Amino acid sequence: MSPAGDLNFTRPKFVGASVARREDPRLLTGGGLYVADIKRHGMLHIAFRRSDMAHAEIRSIDVSAALAHPGVVTVYTGEDIAQLAKPYRATSRMKNYQATFILPLAHKKCATSARRSSQSSPKTATSQRMRWRWSISTMRR
Amino acid sequence: MTDTVTVTVTVNGREYRAEVEPRLLLADFLRETLDLTGTHVGCEHGVCGACTILLNGDSARSCLTFAVQADGSEITTVEGLGSEGALGPVQQAFQDHHALQCGFCTSGMLMTVTDMLQKYPLVTDDEIREALSGNICRCTGYEHIVRAVRALVDARDAAGETP
């Protein structure tokens, strides 16, 4: 008999049935492995410092206090990784959408718009300027 | 370096003793120090309920409790409710009624439900929803969780164990 003519072969097994999930016993007993549960040798905690101001120009970032904090291994700013990471350009099919370049860490500006940065002029004096002083109390855990 | 404090707790029937910093949260103590990662940390400020445990029999937020506060206490976590081969009644009801999807909120849900079954009559589904309101689930829409609890309440009442 051909497989197509075999009812037991062609009839779907799970349609209309309540199917017990295989992962449930694991998840119900605390055996799930979520990202925060993963431990690897030498793994460190990371903390991100987010800008207090939107679209501000970064004049300088003083990381000395953060580096001096006990347990802190290193501090990276956008400048440190500028050579490693190419900006990503996020586009949209939306009409008149202004695509922006996105960096993994802020560099020079908190958010860089391609058009505006090329048009930088004294007229954009409304953009806020900031100096970051980094003090960290929660970085080490 | 910060001074440490000795903490002795009984977790799921087993006694643990550890030197911890006074600022260490109970949730981090369970997860990092004791390696019991079944207790999850979602919001870290007492809103989502994922970190719920039983502290001396009462449900408590382990993210709002310091490990030193739990010194001398009895703790039950999700790992203490049953095993994969032998699910506890609350765990079994959750599986039977498809009351979980990703499982992240499930540990806290199970602890909260274990507590509420011992304390409240839960006559109506509204009362069940009220009792579940401190635990947030983003997968299930709560309907199946309420059904699982309803089945547990009915079984409890049929056994004459209504609080």
Image (cartoon, rainbow, N blue to C red):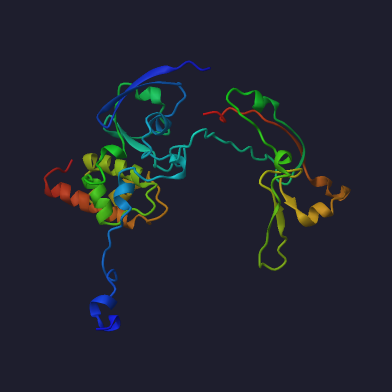
Q: Position of residue B91 (x, y in %)?
A: 26, 47
Seen as rendered, the residue at the extreme top is: B3
Instruction: Assign the C terminus of chain B to one quadrant of the image.
Output: top left
The residue depicted at 34 percent of the width and 43 percent of the height is A31
The residue depicted at 42 percent of the width and 34 percent of the height is B63
In the image, is A28 to the left or to the right of B29? left
Instruction: Look at the picture and state if A34 lies above or below B20.
Output: below
Q: Position of residue B139 (x, y in %)?
A: 40, 55
Task: Give the quadrant of residue B119.
Answer: top left
Task: Give the quadrant of residue A67.
Answer: top right
Q: Position of residue A64 (x, y in %)?
A: 70, 26
Instruction: Look at the picture and state if B73 lies above or below B120.
Output: above
Seen as rendered, the residue at the extreme front is: A1
In the image, is B120 to the left or to the right of A102? left
| Residue B118 in view of the camera | yes
| Residue B124 in view of the camera | no
Q: Is B12 or B55 nearer to us in this picture? A: B12
Q: Is A97 or A29 nearer to us in this picture? A: A29
Task: Give the quadrant of residue B147.
Answer: bottom left
In the image, is A14 to the left or to the right of A140? left
Q: Position of residue B41 (x, y in %)?
A: 43, 39
Q: In the rendered picture of this protein, how many numbered marks are placed on residues?
A: 0
